[in-house]
Image: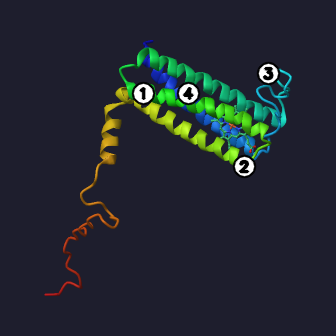
Amino acid sequence: MRGHDLFRFGAVAACLLCYTTILLGGTVMASGSGLACPDWPSCFGNGDLLPAFHGSVAIEWSHRVSAFFLSATVLTVFVLAVAFERSRPALLRMAFGAVVLVVGEALLGALVVESDLQVPIILLHLGIATALFGLLLVLATLANLRGLPRRWLDWARRASEEVPNPVGSSPGIASPSPPSVPEVPYGWPREG
Ligand code: HEM
């Protein structure tokens, strides 16, 4: 497999892992498992990386493990970008931005726990997660753009273009001409 392919597959994997981590984070929040692991990085501060896997500990620990794999994948994508994508500097910059966000997010996750779930810190944690996912989605799309089927690109271009006479136009856009109705004679046909 060529370096470019590794990079574009890695970018898609990072995007999917980020979504998984966000879903698990939401589960931690919704199930009230945020303090099931009161320490960081190990669950109970004893250095044990495999805590008893049940109930809320399982939920909170899954989020952390997923975050770990996400961080490792984002770092790998950046290393691949440095090695193989120097001729695409925008992608290189995005991969670097993703590293900054993911490292910041992991440290902030620790702060979420240490702060006993202070709301502003949780909101920042959610905000950075959203920004990271958006960035990874754009990166994965751009990294794979050249390999996308022609008809997808044509569809995307058509979808972004203005339609001359849109149906149900909004203010500011020229209103559509009414559909032409064929002239149909009405009334009873005269006899004779
Ligand atoms: C690095 C990638 C990470 C991402 C993308 C991420 C994302 C999220 C998201 C989206 C939520 C849900 C927030 C909400 O619904 O308001 C969440 C919750 C949470 N995250 Fe993370 N997280 C990451 C890493 C971490 C790490 C490393 C830790 C712990 C060390 C952590 C601890 C928590 C906790 C405790 C909650 C639940 C907060 C609560 O119960 O209110 N996160 N995370």
Of labels 2 and 3, the one closer to you: 2
Query: CB under 8 Å between callouts 3 and 1?
Result: no
The residue that mark 4 highlights is 99
Of marks 1 and 4, which one's residue comes earlier in the chain?
1
Within 10 Å of disc 3 (Cα), the crowding (few <14, some 14-19, many 20+) is: few
Dot label at residue 49: 3
Q: Residue at x 44, y 25 (%)?
A: 92
The x and y percentages for residue 16 are 56, 32
Sequence-earlier tag: 2 or 3: 3
Q: CA distance from mark 2 to mark 3?
A: 27 Å
Q: Which residue is mark 1?
A: 91
Element class at badge 3: loop
Task: Please identify the quarter of the rendering in which residue 85 is found.
Answer: top left
Instruction: Identify the amino acid type marked 4.
Output: Val
Q: Of marks 3 and 1, which one's residue comes earlier in the chain?
A: 3
Q: Is residue 54 left or right of residue 152?
A: right
Q: Amino acid at mark 3?
A: Leu
Percent x, y of residue 80: 48, 17
Q: Residues within 10 Å of mark 1 (few under 14, many from 20)?
A: many
Left or right: 11 in relation to 19: left
Q: Name the kind of residue labelled 2 in the image.
A: Val
Q: Secondary structure at mark 1?
A: helix
Say what secondary structure mark 4 lies in.
Answer: helix
The Cα–Cα distance between marks 4 and 2, rounded to whole angstroms, is 25 Å
Tag 2–tag 1 contact (CB < 8 Å)? no
Does label 3 or label 4 sit earlier along the sequence? 3
Quarter residue 41 falls in = top right
